[in-house]
Image (cartoon, helix red, strand yellow):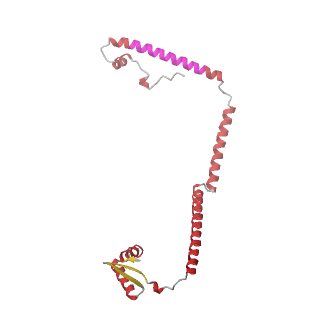
Amino acid sequence: PHSAQDAFGNLQREHGLGKTAVVKALEQLAQQGKIREKAYGKQKIYFPDQDQFPTVSDSELKALDNEISELSSKVQTLQQSCRHMESELKDLNGSMTTPEMIKEIEELKKDCASYTEKLERIKSAANHVTPEEKEKVYNEKKLYCKEWRRRKRMATELLDAILEGYPKSKKQFFEEVGIETDEDYNVTLPVAV
């Protein structure tokens, strides 16, 4: 059973019919005897007239129930198959196509060849640095950095002593004397290794 409002809601969504037209159509169908009308207070409900349908035996109902369960299981099987195929399609859409794979393989082969060539050049170079030479360079660097720190500290102490009695600012003193600091040239002392 449907009220006029239910029928209107369903028909409005699908066909865009107005409520007045739906109510008139339902009343006309009721007058023709195609549907039945029952009033509950101000509300009217409409339902099909069961007399127009042939009676069905219990065996026919059981056969229909069996057919419904068979069709329901088929629907479930098809839905599961559909989900599986959608999942497989999603996986395939996410993977590379054969031309894309071929292009990727070519690019990787080029990269590999360039790295192999670079490695061969490095191996064939005659000017390899021995571990002893490397150690010597690191020791010299450490020595020079240590000396740099020592001299900077000495110069800073000497300049601080001079600036104690100097009437102008440190910056003005450096400009007058012509002192250039590491900071003026954005030079930082390397970290000791």
Residue 124 located left or right of residue 73: right
Question: Along the line of sight, which residue is nearer the eye, 75 or 187?
Answer: 75
Most distant residue in the bottom direction: 32
Q: Is residue 101 magenta?
A: no
Image coordinates for residue 156, horizontal then vertical, percent: 41, 15
Q: Is residue 155 magenta?
A: yes
Relative image position of residue 143 (x, y in whole percent): 54, 17
The number of discs equals 0
Q: Could you tell me residue 116's position as x and y percent?
A: 67, 39
- Residue under the image location 38 percent in, 82 percent down: 37
Q: Residue at x 37, y 16 (%)?
A: 177
- The residue closer to the viewer here, 50 or 170, is 50
Q: Residue at x 60, y 58 (%)?
A: 92
Q: Quadrant of the N terminus?
A: bottom left
User: Can you say whether 121 is above or below 28 in the image?
Assistant: above
83 is higher (above) or lower (below) than 61: above
Instruction: Note whether 163 is above or below 26 in the view shown.
Output: above
Residue 25 in the image: x percent, y percent? 37, 83
Quadrant placement of the C terminus: top right
Q: Quadrant of residue 88?
A: bottom right
State the residue in front, 98 or 77. 77
- To which quarter of the image does residue 130 belong? top right
- Which range is magenta? 136-159
Q: Main secondary structure of the magenta part?
A: helix
Q: Nearer the viewer, residue 96 or 116?
A: 96
Left or right of 192 on screen, residue 165: left
